[in-house]
């Protein structure tokens, strides 16, 4: 799971959702009223889904698992629990059908004081609560909220664990390949591969790699050659200009907070300077 930047819905969309929310309220505000109104609001659902797809990492990946196509609009705070939030834009996430219907369903874990124990990736940085073990693909909990999220979404189900471990192995090779293309002066291929890298599923794996790339011991986890390639690629990207929203998400805080710019980064060369 990675941090997702929530985009504004726009005045027209917000107004349309507000009208539907008012309709639910006037009917009586029950779960049944909210469900029926949500089901009949095809245009509003389409509008919400399109905007969520713009926010999602890669090619419209699920905001929970990061693997499968986000096909469903998930109510973060379940409609069955809070029908008044059925049309609340801040309560909508893009999820795959497995995460939404087979795992989370109406789950909304809370602590003893009533605090929510499920990570909303549009509100907070998931890595605060979750630690991804790159070599195995498993998530470990750093906080009770992390543990509840792993449990509720099924983040350590075998297919995801295997997929993350494979993604980690393949991304290392991609960074080495990127540097080979750059050093050979094949800048067009370099850019194509870099774009493709940021559209791959499991953006959380790339984000975890980026977070540690300039830290002590990164050479042990990533391999010194991969670590060096990653740091060079980041410096080259910066020399080319600001990353896209999706790229920023995939790279976690590293690309925005400058965590990779403070140490260990080679001086920018810029693809155009290499022939
Ligand atoms: Zn999913």
Image: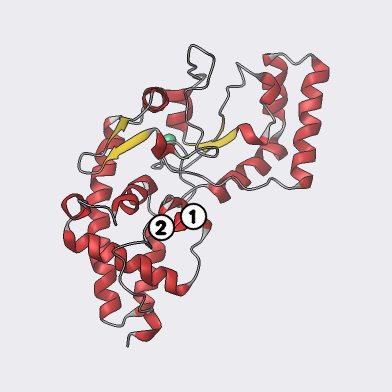
- Answer left or right for 49 relative to 214: right
Circles 2 and 1: CB atoms closer than 8 Å:
yes
**Residue under numbered circle 1:** 246
Report crowding for label 1: few under 14, some 14 to 19, many 20 or more residues within 10 A (C-alpha).
many
Q: Residue at x 41, y 23 (%)?
A: 152
Image spot of residue 58 (x, y percent):
45, 52
Tell me if residue 8 comes above or below residue 92 in the rendering.
Answer: below
How far is mark 2 from mark 1, CA to CA? 7 Å
* Mark 1 element type: helix
Image spot of residue 122 (x, y percent):
54, 40
Image spot of residue 175 (x, y percent):
27, 63
Q: Residue furthest front?
A: 262
Toward the viewer: 231 or 161? 231
- Answer left or right for 239 relative to 78: left
- Answer left or right for 225 relative to 38: left
Q: Residue furthest top?
A: 112
**Residue under numbered circle 2:** 198
Q: Residue furthest right?
A: 26
Quarter of the rendered structure image containing ligand 1: top left
Q: Residue at x 55, y 36 (%)?
A: 93
């Amino acid at each position: 799971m990675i941090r997702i930047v929530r985009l504004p819905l726009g005045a027209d969309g917000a107004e349309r959702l507000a009208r539907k929310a008012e309709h639910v309220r006037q009917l009586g505000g029950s779960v049944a009223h909210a469900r029926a109104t949500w089901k009949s609001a095809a245009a509003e659902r389409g509008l919400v889904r399109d905007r969520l797809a713009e926010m999602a990492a890669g090619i419209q990946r699920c905001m929970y698992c990061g693997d499968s196509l986000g096909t469903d609009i998930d109510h973060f705070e379940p409609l069955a629990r809070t029908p008044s939030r059925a049309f609340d834009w801040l309560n909508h996430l893009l999820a795959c059908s497995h995460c939404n219907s087979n795992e989370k369903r109406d789950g909304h874990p809370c602590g003893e004081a009533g605090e929510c124990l499920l990570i909303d990736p549009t509100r907070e940085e998931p890595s605060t609560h979750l630690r991804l073990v790159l070599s195995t693909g498993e998530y470990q909990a750093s906080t009770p909220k992390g543990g509840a999220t792993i449990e509720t979404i099924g983040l350590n189900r075998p297919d995801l664990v295997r997929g993350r471990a494979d993604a980690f192995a393949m991304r290392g090779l991609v960074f080495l390949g990127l540097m080979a293309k750059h050093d050979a002066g094949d800048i067009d291929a370099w850019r194509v591969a870099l774009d493709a890298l940021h559209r791959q599923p499991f953006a959380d794996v790339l984000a975890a790699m980026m977070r540690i790339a300039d830290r002590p011991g990164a050479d042990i986890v990533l391999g010194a050659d991969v670590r060096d390639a990653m740091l060079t690629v980041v410096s080259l990207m910066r020399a080319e200009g600001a990353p896209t929203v999706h790229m920023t998400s995939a790279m976690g805080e590293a690309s925005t907070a400058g965590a990779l710019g403070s140490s260990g980064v080679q001086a920018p060369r810029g693809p155009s300077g290499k022939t």
